[in-house]
Image (spheres, rainbow, N blue to C red):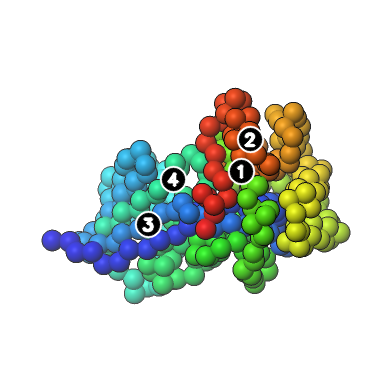
Amino acid sequence: MTTAVHTYRASCKLMLFGEYFVLRGSKSLAFPLKFGQALEVLESTSLSWTGISPQGVWFEAKFDDKLNIIDASNTETAEILKGIFLKIKELNPRVNLNQKFTATADFMLEWGLGSSSTLLSLLSQWAGVNPYDLLESSFGGSGYDIACATAEGPILYEIKERNTENVELDESITNNFLFVYLGKKQSSRQEIARFEKNEIGDSDVILLNEIISKALESKTIEEFESCLNSSEDLLTQFIGKAKLKEAIFADYKYSIKSLGAWGGDFFLATYRDIEEAKSYFSNKGYDTMFTYKELIK
């Protein structure tokens, strides 16, 4: 008979400023979300995993005591999970892997909000290991998403020494934020690999940090929009992609900023009238939208 041992929680994320450049040492402004994953761990005689989303069970796997895959609904996912557990065992040899794990996401996985980062955070919480060590041996990336997983509000993050600072944005600004799902999930690893070929100078990193500082000092939505636009202007020089507003939403009145891997997942749109903004994007076929208060912790 199995008995519950522990339940853990990790938050999803969105990066507002610093995409790609954070890998070169810039600051990044990021948000932990109200969406996330919970992990229930029960004592068992072997290791098994069940992944659940709002659509139901999406992944199941069973392993033997040597972490060989006995059965899996998706072999590639099972291999990734196996690699994470092998690293956990390396970092904490005393951990008992004979558990029944159930990971429940309260968001649609295709939204790209952080199923991988929340997974690493959950398992590191359970195993008592450093989540950044798991990140480096698995998915890679800057680690801002790992920082967001356990944050209670907006953060400034730097890859150097994994520095995290809590920050606040004025409600007069965030009350004009609408997060819209573009519906084209991007592979962060592929986008990062493509970006790594670019030569980013120290002056570019300094410029982005100045934009972020100005954004945090902004008192009005107009000042903040200027920072959003400046960031888009800077990033487009290196990404090799057209700005999202120019490509799809040229007739939109206010600012639009790509988030995370440019070209997919969510973007930020500022507005003055929420119903007008929602109507605009709905008419263009984008129906998944959240205000700041609905989405951000």
**Position of residue 50 measured from the top left corner of the image (x, y, whole percent):** 31, 49
Mark toward the viewer: 2 or 3: 2
Residue, disc 1: 178
**Position of residue 172 measured from the top left corner of the image (x, y, whole percent):** 67, 54
* Residue type pointed to by label 3: Ala
**Position of residue 179 measured from the top left corner of the image (x, y, whole percent):** 59, 43
Task: State whether residue 290 appears in this view.
Answer: yes
Graded by Cα atoms within 10 Å as few (under 14), some (14 to 19) or many (20 or more), the crowding at tag 4 reads some
Quick check: marks 1 and 2 in contact, CB under 8 Å?
yes
Mark toward the viewer: 1 or 2: 2
Question: Residue shown at 44%/45% (left/top)?
Answer: 107
Residue, disc 2: 277
Estimate the spatial distance between the alpha carbons at disc 1 and disc 2, rounded to whole Å: 8 Å
Graded by Cα atoms within 10 Å as few (under 14), some (14 to 19) or many (20 or more), the crowding at tag 1 reads many
Question: Residue shown at 61%/39% (left/top)?
Answer: 274
Mark toward the viewer: 1 or 4: 1
Q: Which mark is residue 231?
A: none
Quick check: marks 3 and 1 in contact, CB under 8 Å?
no
Estimate the spatial distance between the alpha carbons at disc 3 and disc 4, rounded to whole Å: 11 Å
The mark nearer the N terminus, 1 or 2, is 1
* Residue type pointed to by label 4: Phe
Mark toward the viewer: 3 or 1: 1
149 vs 237: above or below: below
